[in-house]
Image (cartoon, helix red, strand yellow):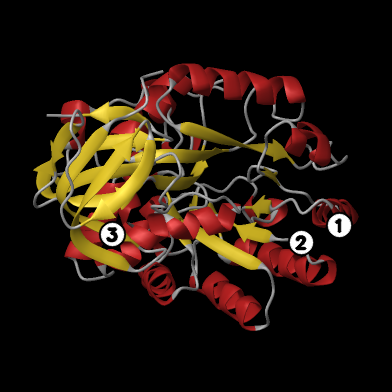
Amino acid sequence: MSQKAHLLIRKGRVIDPNTGRDEVLDVLIENGRLVRIAASLDAPGAEIINAEGMLVLPGLVDTCVHLSEPGGGRSGSIASETRAAASAGITHLCAQPNTDPVIDSTAVVRLIRERSFKAGFAKVLPLAAMTQQLEGRQLAEMATLKEAGCIGVSNAGRPVQDALVLKRSFEYAATFDIPVMMRPQDAALSAGGCAHEGPVASRLGLPGIPAVAETIELSRALILCEATGVRLHVQQISCSASTALIRDAKARGLPVTADVSIHHLLLDESALEGFNSDCHIQPPLRSREDREALLVAVADGTIDAVCSQHIPLGSSSKQAPFPSTRAGIAGIETLLPLMLKLVDQGALTLHRAIALLSSGPARCLGQQIGHLEIGRNASLCVVDAAAMRTPIDDWLSAGKNSPWLDAELPGNVRLTVCEGRVTWLSD
């Protein structure tokens, strides 16, 4: 772990969606703490970072990362993937519980926290398993796992088919004020599927997953949320009908937030043409109309956060007939560049894009992060948004399963500070 930062970041465009700040200012970090933000500062002995023409942003927060350690058949380690996160301006990442062993014991929580602290690149916020072994039958010890350091519970996209088990899970979580993170997908309707049930899947002969597989499960969860009062965060919604359900739930005052993966905002089912296995993900890429509805929902606030849904896989995982390949994209290093691409395309304002990666996900997770607060350990990044780069040139994740490896994308992170320590510094 590096020493506490003593930095003067000069003349950067400081954007903090939490406060609405957007000005060219100096930022002073002393002994790791953010001590001043002002028009012109001096700090004898501080290292000077020239941020002229660059963005100074809160440390980015990723609500969905699948880490490779402990095991689980994915590639890399906590060290490699958190280093990749730091290079992308991400200071806090929410780790799903589908590791091997599953995060349903305090020993596994301690292991993950110790290894992420030792690596020192980004802070891992682990989610506890909602049910034992993620099997959907018996409740895990949620309160004990919260005390051990888990920030919420999830079944990592695996179904809880028994409505009574799901109801009791929500009641237990509500009693202890534990957020529930849930990716809705009905097991029976999605069984064996690998693509959106639509014209592309039909033409390619791929087994489909209908959008209703998501909305049926989402509807059930929202009904139980209303009945129990649990804080519900819906992860990786993928279709237009889901945005309508979330919009309605929020209008009725339910304690519901939602995120979407960056890939569902840029790609649709047409990306599967040619059996491109790098675009095999769950939930599947859906229709162009669904993608457009998701973009509207992130712009108008229905969706609160955009995540990487990072799943690093070895090359062999994608080298098979499409239905036999493993689902997942290594997305942590392209999260910010792809958001900046959406800004360049006019789909989002810069402020909204940054909010979806900082203050928005922080609120979804119930954490006091994702903003620039004087007096606290600094978590921020400095980004040259105008710089164009090709991800493969300096790719750090052990998983190279991405359709964006050879694309020219905007945004180069020059500095990342995580909880008072410099975790990334590039030339």
Mark 2 / mark 3, whichever is N-terminal: 3
Going 29% across and 45% down the picture, which residue do you hit? Answer: 274
Going 59% across and 23% down the picture, which residue do you hit? Answer: 112
Q: Secondary structure at mark 3?
A: strand
Side (left or right) of 246 relative to 418: right
Side (left or right) of 370 relative to 176: left
Q: Do tag 3 and tag 1 residues touch (Cβ < 8 Å)? A: no
CA separation in Å, label 3 and label 1:
39 Å
Per the image, the residue denoted by label 1 is 171
Q: Quadrant of the N terminus?
A: top left
Residue 235: percent from left, percent from top: 56, 55
Counting other residues with Cα less than 10 Å from the Cα at mark 2, is it few (<14), some (14-19), or many (20 or more)?
many
Mark 3 / mark 1, whichever is N-terminal: 3
Side (left or right) of 343 relative to 365: left
Q: Callout 3, which amino acid?
A: Ile
Q: Is residue 327 above or below residue 27?
A: above
Residue 203: percent from left, percent from top: 38, 57
Q: Is residue 268 above or below residue 92?
A: below
For marks 2 and 3, give the one nearer the viewer. 3
Per the image, the residue denoted by label 3 is 15
Per the image, the residue denoted by label 2 is 230
CA separation in Å, label 2 and label 3:
32 Å
Q: Secondary structure at mark 2?
A: loop
Q: Callout 1, which amino acid?
A: Glu
Residue 55: percent from left, percent from top: 20, 52
Query: 61 or 77: nearer the eye?
Result: 61
Residue 338 at least partly seen? no
Q: Do tag 2 and tag 1 residues touch (Cβ < 8 Å)? A: yes
Q: Do tag 2 and tag 3 residues touch (Cβ < 8 Å)? A: no
Q: Is residue 148 above or below residue 350?
A: above
